[in-house]
Amino acid sequence: MLTPTQPFPDLKLPTLSGEDVDVRQNMGENGAIVVFYRGLHCPICKKQLQEIEGQLDQAKDLGVTVLAVSGDTKSRAEDTVSETETTRLNIAHDLSMTEAREWGLYVSTAREGSEEPELFSEPGIFYLLPDGTVYAAWVQSFPFARPPFEDVLAAVKFRNDKGYPPRGSYTGPLVEHDGTTKVEAVDGPKAEAY
């Protein structure tokens, strides 16, 4: 799991513009939003990409870049763009499932008789800061009930305006209801085994 305030993994992928993108080098003044989508087979993803496309100007005004990423091949990503008419959104492809796991995304297998790839990642949205750390994450195990992109942008605006700190970053010892203390979380910066 990626914890807010901790560094995010490298993400260098080809895009439909023909150039590779490195998320660390492709940040606005206030960071980047990376949207992982399931792929061409997902109608909800297509609707989400259209929604994001319509709000790219607001994202730019907030000082963040937006990158959409899937494990689709280049040709499948091109078909997604053709079907959604998303001409302004920067779309990266060929995310490996190892990279998906590094980002804490859930990975699914194809349903029998579906047009799904053999393996693909479920959706996730990450707001990343220019210092190379995660500010916030929205990660899902299935395609439904995604946060509206306007809500994600509202979180960016609130952080910008109020200096609101990242939440969910604590990885230290936990005091349980019975008063006992557990050691640090296994994925924390000073993790110990339970």
Image (tube, grey):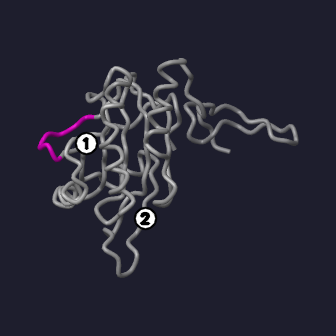
What residue did someone put label 2 on? 108
Q: Give yes or no for contact between labels 1 and 2 (Cβ–Cβ under 8 Å).
A: no
- Above-or-below relation of 152 to 16: above
Q: Which amino acid, by three-letter code, is at mark 1?
A: Leu
- Above-or-below relation of 59 to 113: above
The quarter of the displayed image where residue 110 is located: bottom left
Does residue 18 belong to the magenta stretch? Answer: yes
Q: Nearer the viewer, residue 146 or 118?
A: 146
Residue 179: image location, x then y, percent: 86, 37
Residue 10: image location, x then y, percent: 33, 37
The boundaries of the magenta stretch are: 16-22
Image check: 105 left or right of 173?
Answer: left
The quarter of the displayed image where residue 27 is located: top left
Q: If you read the primary sequence from the N terminus, does the residue marked by circle 1 or circle 2 appear first?
A: 1
Residue at (62% x, 33% y) in the render: 171
Q: How many marks?
A: 2
Does residue 62 belong to the magenta stretch? Answer: no
What residue did someone put label 1 on? 89
- Neighbor class of circle 1 (other Cα within 10 Å; few <14, some 14-19, many 20+) is many
Image check: 131 left or right of 12?
Answer: right
Residue at (49% x, 47% y) in the render: 147
- Above-or-below relation of 16 to 167: below
Q: Secondary structure at mark 2?
A: strand
Work out which quarter of the rendered image holds the C terminus and state it. top right
- Neighbor class of circle 2 (other Cα within 10 Å; few <14, some 14-19, many 20+) is some
Q: Secondary structure at mark 1?
A: loop
Residue at (32% x, 42% y) in the render: 54
| Numbered badge on residue 59 | none
